[in-house]
Image (cartoon, helix red, strand yellow):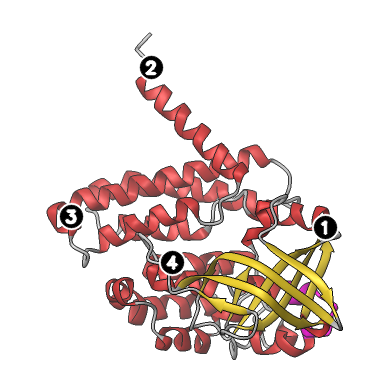
Amino acid sequence: MTTTAHPLVVRARRLATELLAPQAEWVDQEGVPGSHIEAVKRSGLLGVVAPVAYGGSGAPPAVLRETAEILAGACCATWFVQTQHHTPVQTLAQSELPVRERLLGPLSRGELLSGVAYAHLRAYPHVPVRVHREADGWRFDGTVPWYTGWGLNDVMMLAGMTAAGEVLFAFTEARDQPGLRASTPLRLAALTAARTVSLDLDGLWLPEEAVALRAPYAAWAPGDRARTLNAGPAVFGIAEAALSLLDEETAGPLRSRLADVRRRAYALADHPVPQERADERLAVRAEAYEMLRTATTAAVVAGGGRSMALTSRAQRLAREGLFLLVQGQTAESREAHLRALAHGEASRSAPPQ
């Protein structure tokens, strides 16, 4: 079976065509509705890479990537809410702790939607969230700068650092509770619809049985770094959606270039050693962003003055492209992207020889 014919890819296309894309401009202004999340839950897409034994599909990474492209290109805000869910699923699938048996099934079957609060770990040695042993559990204190899906997620996977230099991930309900308070939703240039907040943690206590992962930071960080080296599928999904707004004379050459970058990016993503060829991965990631910028700019130009209306699909895609420039960004990826931009500007401005 080809990836395009996989049942989950077919379902993703149907969901995108019948629900997400037609309402995307409304969602951009009004927020992701609960009905969109219920539709995603029913689709089976939340279990795309979840173990079959727990109700998931156990599909290969290529299927996850293609469904992500489809959802992001149709409604990036809805994609962004649901994409958080796959990290908790994968974490539980690799865990041997009791919480696996309590939550992996409901998450794999789409009965529950999980958010994540762990990107702040990348600020190490700065520690925004501290974790201390307290009684038969753990106390969380600090601030989570970004948490997406507030009011839509059922549970969250929350991370912090212990005094011993360990990362600790634990699950709790995604709601205000003693020791956990969410800010008002953040107003952003793009994806305000995804309901992003900051979380104030002041003595949130979670029991030992809520813990999904506990490991030295030095052991956890390389795997996380590997995930941030590659170009993400949403970049290609939004770029392709932007190209669909152009006439074929303009879109054709751009689509060929996009397909080439996509092919190389996914070949690197499938490399058996995720930490190898880091410089090449970062270079291709920067190329993907350049294609995204070109595609969304072309869509805005083609739309003319109409592109300035908030109801413009081209403008929404361009703003979502800006968001993807910093989504999942690390100091390493930012520096590599800036180097690529500086090199490109230098090449264009150099006098002819």
Where disc 2 sits, the SS reads loop
Disc number placed over residue 350 in the picture, else none:
2
Mark earlier in primary sequence (2, 3): 3
Q: Amino acid at mark 4?
A: Ala
The residue that disc 4 covers is 72
Q: Which residues are magenta?
A: 91-100
Mark earlier in primary sequence (2, 1): 1
Other-residue count near label 3 (Cα within 10 Å), few / some / many at <14 / 14–19 / ≥20:
some
Indicate which label's residue lies in the foreground, 3 or 1: 1
Where disc 3 sits, the SS reads helix
Mark earlier in primary sequence (4, 2): 4
* Circle 4/circle 2 CB separation < 8 Å: no
Mark earlier in primary sequence (4, 1): 4
Where disc 1 sits, the SS reads loop
The residue that disc 1 covers is 165
Residue occupying image coordinates x 70% and y 76%: 203
Indicate which label's residue lies in the foreground, 2 or 1: 1
Residue occupying image coordinates x 31% and y 77%: 30
Residue 21: quadrant of the picture: bottom left
Indicate which label's residue lies in the foreground, 4 or 1: 1
Q: Position of residue 176 (x, y in %)?
A: 56, 84
